[in-house]
Image: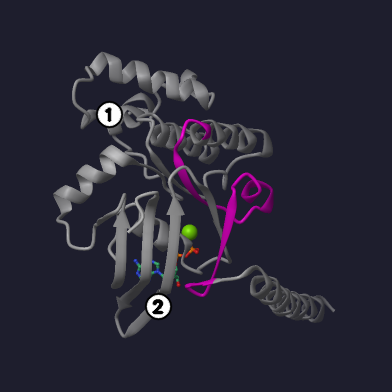
Amino acid sequence: MSTDHVIEIEKLNKVFYTDEIETHALSDIDLHIAKGEYVSIAGPSGCGKSTLLSILGLLDTPSGGSYRLNGVSVDDIDVYERARIRNQEIGFVFQAFNLIGELTVAENVSMPLVYREGISKNERLQLAEAALERVAMAHRLHHYPAQLSGGQQQRVAVARALVGQPKILLADEPTGNLDSRNGEAVMALLEELHAHGATICMVTHDPRYAEFAQRGVHLFDGRIVDEETINQLREEEEVRLRALIDKARQSARAATA
Ligand code: ADP
Ligand code: MG
């Protein structure tokens, strides 16, 4: 096995079982990400992007296939080992932020440092404040998440992911709730982390932000598809959506006629 790959995923599957329904969220995913690479993942809503990122971040386990992280299989490790690796290696920006409501902004951001050795509480809070400055949120240190707007919570979530200077950053639509100026600021932080050697995997459906990555991976219906296929699927989707819009408009017109 090559050691210059941080992430090596082969024949990965994920099936969710709810009541009588089986959802094949991911099918036969092969994905290799090199050390220091910056990869974007794109695809329509529900295609499996968040599921894939959660598995990459050791937050969820696959139903089948293999995953090697830094050249070591993580298929059979226990929850403690998962947590340890996650804490040492990975920064994660959740699509739904996942800030802890009972903790202040500063406490939320310093959380990833709690499990690191040799950092005092004071140092943690200083590092948290510095990270919050980078996302222009240092003026809200003592606020609680519920007292912030969606965009502000997202910026705090980005600060929390970056505070420990992770070697791997996994970001799930990190600009989804931001205006273009704040979106650019977050992208600049990701670029900086990347320039310092971090491996980045970012989910985004915004082509402007996907441009920042060195390589784009396209997901459709739980599978990785190539550029040509995705363009064709997009056109078909466009036709389907047009038809839905036309139907709704006709129905609205008929109702008001
Ligand atoms: P995306 O992030 O691309 O919008 P997700 O990875 O969130 O998509 O979801 C992929 C598919 O898996 C969807 O069909 C979704 O409904 C399903 N899914 C995701 N999480 C669960 C879950 N915990 N239980 C059941 N189905 C799920
Ligand atoms: Mg998602």
Q: Is residue 142 visible?
A: no
Mark 2: few, some, or many residues within 10 Å (few <14, many ≥20)?
some
Q: Nearer the viewer, residue 179 or 227?
A: 227
For residue 115, what is the image quadrant?
Answer: top left
Q: Is residue 19 visible?
A: yes
Reading the image, the residue beneath label 1 is 113
Q: Quadrant of the N terminus?
A: bottom left
Q: Residue at x 46, y 67 (%)?
A: 48
Q: Which residues are magenta?
A: 195-224
> What is the x, y in percent for residue 32?
44, 59
Q: Does 151 sit left or right of 57 as displayed? A: right
Q: Is residue 228 magenta?
A: no
Check the image and report above or below for 252 versus 214: below
Q: Is residue 223 magenta?
A: yes
Q: Residue at x 37, y 45 (%)?
A: 98
Q: Earlier in the sequence, mark 2 or mark 1?
A: 2
Q: Which mark is residue 24?
A: 2
> What is the x, y in percent for residue 215?
58, 54
Disc 2 CB within 8 Å of nearest ligand 1 atom: no
Q: Does 93 sit left or right of 108 as displayed? A: right
Q: What SS does tag 1 mark?
A: helix
For residue 230, what is the image quadrant?
Answer: bottom right
Under mark 1, the amino acid is Leu
Q: What SS does tag 2 mark?
A: strand
Q: CA distance from mark 2 to mark 1?
A: 36 Å
Q: Residue at x 15, y 48 (%)?
A: 80
